[in-house]
Image (spheres, helix red, strand yellow):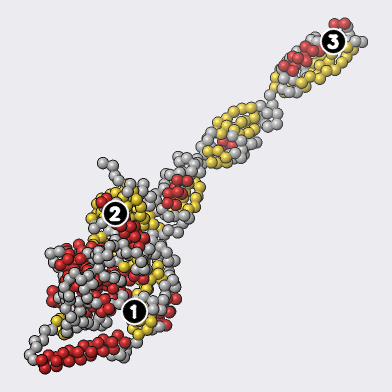
Amino acid sequence: MATQVYSGRYEIVEHLARGGMAEVYVAYDQLLDRRVALKVLFPEFAADRSFVERFRREARSAAGLNHHNVVSVYDTGEEDGTYFIVMEYVEGRTLRDIIRSEGPLLPQRAADIGADIAAALAFAHRHGVVHRDVKPGNVLIDRAGRVKVTDFGIARAGDMQENLTQTGAVMGTATYFSPEQAQGGAIDPRSDVYSLGVVLYEMVTGRPPFSGDSPVAIAYQHVRETPAPPSSVNPDVPPDFEACVLKCLAKNPANRYASADDLRADLIRFGQGQRVRAEPVLVPPLPDATAVTPALDATRVISQTRAGTVLPEDTPARSSTGRYVALLLVLLGVLGLLLWLLGSQLGLFDKAATRVTVPTVVSLTEDQARNRLEAKGFKVKAQRAANDTAPAGTVYDQSPAAEVKADKGSEVTIFVSSGAAPLKVPDVVGQDVDAARAALGRAGFTHVSVTQRADNTAPAGRVLDQDPKGNAEAAKDAPVTLIVSSGRDKVVVPDVRGRDLADAANLLGQSGFPSTTRNQASDTVAAGKVITTDPPAGQRVDRNSLVTIVVSTGSETAAVPNVVGESQAQATADLQRAGFGVDVKSKPAQNDSEIGNVVKQDPAPDTKATKGSTVTITVGSQP
């Protein structure tokens, strides 16, 4: 069976998971040479316009979230009516799998994981996106222990007016619903805080706070029932951690943490052994927004059994007077508790604590951010991570967020960019230089330089080597150097003219040229000396090419023909044919037979003379 490829580049490798709306696969990006996660909408939903719109909204929402605790979205598209999203592939396990395999986690580890989840949610909230499906299955932990939140599958931009769900429709996972989600009410970032509270509860107890036979039964409990304190399930849960969890699980959003940043700050305080800010609160059920469930009970009185743990307290009525007294005491207690909570929030009971507005340091350099925060009295902790949008050395996020109140002397974490995430360098050795440049460009490398090097085996233009090496990782803006063949090694033929044969052959051999010899007469070059070479001196030719040495044999001689007695015309022709020039002189004839004929020649007949030299003939003339 042929392997399925989406958009001509994403090749399916294996099935990874099945979600509520889509299948998730591991795929190979043939263009960028990397593994990715490919989320494909179920065929039965592809024809549903609302589902398709929701699926596309997921891509647009998540693609704008560039954070080290958020799974990146790379691409989206449509293939034969099937819609898909391409995401970062995180090699590791889901938090759900970790809880199932390891059981309850240590509170310290749960706080660390929860703080990272809260950081991802806070970043999304600042960009107007509410996740709405926070659960262990949507939290990935890679092999290095890094936490990544994924699947903003039912997220929506917080400022969008269009509601993509029908009235009364509920989206999400019932086990991790907020009460307002369960009733189809308005959703805001505090709904994600509630869901994260459920996740924190499950991490330290091994089970969620509510369970039932159906999603409706579980949703009903989220709205109406008070969760058992985590310490009643796992006695090893510390009071401060429990206080954080129960504050997240407040039925009324106003009683929860105001933001994921505030929750993250409390979890970090717990992890550092500091006092958390979570306090016990009244936990009234929400009013019935749908008129489907029975009327909810009124707010009940709660008593504190340990720090952050709240339980209902039932007081039997003995008489009308006793009930009135009890009611008065309850109201006074509630009033006192509210005043105490207000005073705690304002820092009236903690004289050493001074609340200071956290300044914004995003886009500043690390040193500038430190100076600005320390000037306000904060301690600074820096965390470095790759970031494709922020220049190296600049701050791209901070926690707590800018403009929130925090204790003077408390810690502010700044996230400093270490530059763009490294990319895998394609192996282009053996390719044509133009094809190699194109492959590097597709991989994100644009600073490519070429160095020529002669090679006796590779044709000109073939890549011989590269730096960095193929399959290594390098920054996106890193220079890549290609060593390209210029063809066979070319060498200049040395000038050996006028040298002895042995000397000339030796010099050519030292330059890498074998040689052969050819003799040639020369009137200008002495015998035994080199007249020229073939190829000639100064020409660039392949190393080891054969060079012919042309050696002089001296001037060429020949016997002078005997032309005495011949007519002037015949004598001239014979001498020229023998390679000699002719000079004619006249002399009065001694007899009639000499008239018009050669009577004398110089050089004499049959003597040796240099070819091309002149023979003088004397022709008899009329007396």
Within-10-Å neighbours for mark 1: few <14, some 14–19, many 20+: many
Quote the CA–CA distance across marks 2 and 1. Answer: 49 Å
Question: At 87% from the left edge and 15% from the top edge, which residue is drawn?
Answer: 586
- Left or right: 430 in relation to 509: left
Question: At 20% from the left edge and 79% from the top edge, which residue is drawn?
Answer: 284
Q: Which amino acid does the dot numbered 3 rest on?
A: Gly
> Which residue was labeled with disc 1?
411
Above or below 510: residue 419: below
Of pointers 2 and 1, the one earlier in the residue sequence: 2
Q: Nearer the viewer, residue 189 or 271?
A: 189
- Left or right: 363 in relation to 532: left
Within-10-Å neighbours for mark 3: few <14, some 14–19, many 20+: many
> Which residue was labeled with disc 2?
48
Of pointers 3 and 2, the one earlier in the residue sequence: 2
Q: Nearer the observer, disc 2 or disc 1?
A: 2
Per the rendering, the mark at residue 105 is none
Q: Which amino acid does the dot numbered 2 rest on?
A: Asp
Residue placed furthest toward the left: 318
Of helix, strand and loop, which one carries label 1? strand
Question: At 44% from the left edge and 76% from the top edge, which residue is drawn?
Answer: 368
Above or below 203: residue 428: above
Indicate the position of residue 517 as horizontal and vertical percent values: 57, 30
- Left or right: 389 in relation to 586: left
Point out the image quarter for the N terminus. Answer: top left
Above or below 501: residue 138: below
